Amino acid sequence: MARPKRSSQPADPEQDAVTGAVAANLARLRAERGWSLDVLAGRAGVSKAMLHQIESGRSVPTIAVVWRVAQGLNVPFGDLLARPATSSDALLRRSEAKWLTNAEGSFASRALFPFDGPARSAEFYELRLKPGAVEEAAAHAHATIEHLVVSAGTIEVAVGGEVHRVAAGDCLVFAADRPHTYRNSDVRHDAHAFLMMTYALPGQIHA
């Protein structure tokens, strides 16, 4: 059998860090539940082959895939990017940021919080949308709320049958347990935003 061709592109330390963190945490979280890859595939809507590639560190997952896996495991998104704690303080240097992108590379997100420590009720992200970018997000866990603050450009957020135009300096707060879409309708300039997601921790959700 012919050997696979090696990429001529140099290794990307940032992507390597993302791949390694997701691989280790996926394996740990799945083992804690005693689930096979088949079970998780059914719960997350991600193929067994893709899960195997991610868990073995041979595939860099997209944002959409990480979201589906997190939902299948019933954990916050950030739990799949977690690394062991090294200090009670955390300086998150921009040069060391771990960016996740969509399949097209038009939408990118980086976490602005340390992944270690006890369960969180909130997470904070920086978002980038290239000109004309559209990112469709599946419904998150019940009672998840998003707080989106646009810092540059305008982002259209479609949720619950409504479209909200969020300009620079505006803040949109909405229930994110429904499918929603982010769109940068400007075909010339990037849009930047900051997003806080708040979750209901176990025991806080009431019917």
Image (cartoon, grey):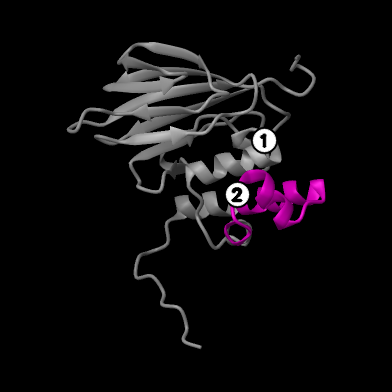
Q: Nearer the viewer, residue 126 or 157?
A: 157
The first of marks 2 and 1 along the sequence is 2
Residue 184 occupies which quadrant of the picture?
top left
Q: Is residue 63 left or right of residue 163?
A: right
Identify the disc placed on residue 131. Answer: none
Please give the range of residues in magenta. 22-50
Q: Does any portion of residue 115 appear in the rendered image?
A: yes
Would you say residue 41 sits in the magenta stretch? Answer: yes
Question: Which structural element holds mark 2?
Answer: helix
Q: Which of the labelled discs sits on residue 116, or is there none?
A: 1
Horizontal relation, residue 7 to residue 160: left or right: left
Looking at the rendered image, the quarter that the C terminus falls into is top right
- Label 2, label 1: how far apart the Cα atoms are: 14 Å
Q: Residue at x 17, y 33 (%)?
A: 188
Q: Main secondary structure of the magenta part?
A: helix
Tell me, yes or no, if residue 83 can be seen here. Answer: no
Q: Is residue 168 magenta?
A: no
Quadrant of res 175 = top right
- Category of crowding for the residue at label 2, using alpha-carbon neighbours closer than 10 angstroms: few (below 14), some (14–19), many (at least 20): many
* Label 2 vs label 1, nearer the camera: 2
Kind of residue at badge 1? Asp
Question: Judging from the image, what secondary structure is the residue with disc 1 in?
Answer: loop
Which residue bears the numbered disc 2?
22
